[in-house]
Structures are given as C-alpha cells and as structure tokens.
Image (cartoon, helix red, strand yellow):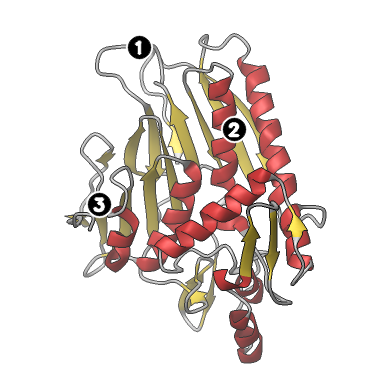
Amino acid sequence: MDPMADGPDLHTIVVGREAMGCRFEVVFNAGEVADATEAGCDALDLVDEIEARISIYRDSSELAAINAAAGRWVEVTADTLALLRLALEIGNQTGGAFDIAAGPLVQAWGFVRRQGRTPAADEFAAALAVSGAGQVELDNDGCRARVCVAGAGLNPGGIGKGWAVDRAVEQLSAAGVPSCLLHGGQSSVRAIGTQGPAQPGRTGWKVGLRHPLRPGRRLATFTLCDRALGTSGSGTQFFVERGRRLGHILDPRSGRPAEGVISATVLAPTAAAADALATAAYVLGEAGLPQIVARDPAVGVMLVVPAAGRGLRVVLANVHEGDVSLDLEPGLELTRFPVPPVA
C-alpha cells in the first residue's frame, strides 16, 4: 500500500523511522499542523515504546518474559494486556484462524527468522501440541498474563504493527491533529480527517494497493475515512518445496501454511482489528467471509484469489462503491460476496 498524492494541491509532510522490522511513517497535510515534525517524532517514539514491550525478539520485552515463564504469571502494562485481550477475542470470533499463541508453529516452520522450511514430523507435532489460544490465560484484575505449558509462546506478528499504529494515531488526535495517515510497513494503515485542503466532495485519504503478483502495478485505490486498512499476503515471504510455494502465513488450526488466497485486505475501524482480521481472511478464504464481516457492518474484505485458467478474481464483501476503485485489467474477474444479516 502507499499513500497517494494526486493533484497539485495535495502536499504532505512525512516523518518516518524504522521500527518493528519495517518503515513506519506519519503523513501530515503540509501547513496544517504547526509542529508536525515534532508531533510525528512523538508518535514514532510511542511506536518504539510499544515495540520494546511486545517484541519477541527482545529478551527484555513483556511478551518475551511471558514466553520464558511458562506456567507463571507475569505482570504487564495495561496496554499490553488490552492487546492480548483483543487478540484472543478476534481469535475466538474467527474460530482460531487468527491466533496470537501460534508462536511455536511459526518457530518450527522457520518464519521467525525468515528462513522457511518444513519441520520434521516430531518437531511439527511438538509445536502443534503447545500452540493455540487455550495455552494463554489473562488476569484482568491483576494485570497479568501467562502461557500454561513450557514451549508455548505468544507471537504478535499479525496484530502488533496495527496496535502500534492505533496508539500513535490516537495520541496525535488527542494532541489536536485534525488529519493524518500513519502506516507500518505499508501493510497496516490508519487515517483520520481529510487529505489536502477542504473541498466539496473530498473525503478521507487515498491509499493505493499494489498488485500482489505484479510489482510496480496498482490493483486498487481505497479511500480511508477515519478508518484503517490491513493487508496479508505471502508475496515476499515464502519458500518452495517440491514445486509447491509455501507462504509464511500459517493456518493455526492445522499448523500448516494457508493456501488458496493470494492476498486479503480488510477495512475496519482500527488498524489492529484490520491486521488480525486480514490474517484470518487469508486463512479462511471465501468460505469464511461471513465470520469476518457479518458481525460488524464497519468491516469490509477484499480477497484476491486465483481464477479459472490463469487469471485472478477479486472478491469484495461489504466493501461499498465509495470505499474502493479497482484498476481492472484483462483476466481480472470481480465477485461481490453476499453478506448475510447478523443473526
């Protein structure tokens, strides 16, 4: 994804920094916020603080402490506890298609260090046995968390960047910033206000979605109006084994790489929800769309899946005309998924 600046009146100030293994950027309308650079740096400082608490790559983090203290309660900040609570709620909503406690499986498949490989049968079975949200307990009153058995582990990879984006945007909004866009690695985005000066008919921020198979091409343009967007796909993290391309997004229920979807993009009120639900949508595919969108009218999904033959099919569920415009091309099919009413 990339923030788009079309038109001579759309000038921006961008403040960026490396964090969580990617580039975070805060984008302001030029001239709208007097201390934009300072505000952007403060927001990125908050991202750094959150990374220090939740990164599993830092032994001093709260999540690393939980993973290392199997069976014992670990005190955490209220913010980290809220992140874990949300992750477990989304995991329950999606039937386990998103699971923050799939850390042992991610480790077994080599994706923690971005060195994908198929684990040996005994290693795989051992990782699967200690994975899953059932291994996690939260103590809301005591602000504590724990994993229940040795070898179990939390991995916030599918929600952490979005969580940091949300906290940073909320800080900017509380400081009086009327409009901005913040992204982490271009896959987790949240926007408030309007891009550019106020004009009749102009709303939100334009964000381009790159074609998952053709670098340099745009597949769609989303308009984010006080909304967030998350995208999941295995276009850059995968390995090939016996002619099969296996991506880094695992189906926590089976413990194996998810297949059948090329990319999943979710619109949601928050970046954390968009991130986690995009991961779940990638795992569940078309059959699981009701689980993603039927419970919340503010959530929409765009899947890119293989079409018959050699083309692609775009599946839209609860994505309205003003939300997205597609860059149609020969061989690109479009399906609108009927969303059943909430029971």
Residue hosting label 2 = 168
Which amino acid lies under the numbered mark 1 shown in the image of this protein? Ala
Disc 1 secondary structure class: loop
Kindly identify the amino acid type of the residue bearing the numbered disc 2: Ala
Instruction: Find residue 233 and report its image quarter.
Output: bottom left
Which residue in the structure is indicated by mark 1?
A: 198
Q: How far apart are marks 2 and 1 (CA)?
A: 24 Å
- Is residue 273 depicted above or below 6 in this figure? below
> Which residue position holds label 3?
316
- Mark 1 surroundings: few (<14), some (14-19) or many (≥20) residues within 10 A: few
Residue 90 locus on image (x, y percent)? 46, 57
Question: In the rendered structure, which disc, 2 or 1, sits on the residue that comes first in sequence?
Answer: 2
Residue 233 visible at all? no
Mark 3 → mark 2, Cα distance in angstroms: 29 Å
**Label 2 CA crowd tier, 10 Å (few <14, some 14–19, many 20+):** many
Compared across the picture, whether 51 is left or right of 232 comes to right
Q: Which residue is drawn at 41% across and 67% down?
A: 283
Query: Where residue 149 sits: x, y (%)?
Result: 70, 77
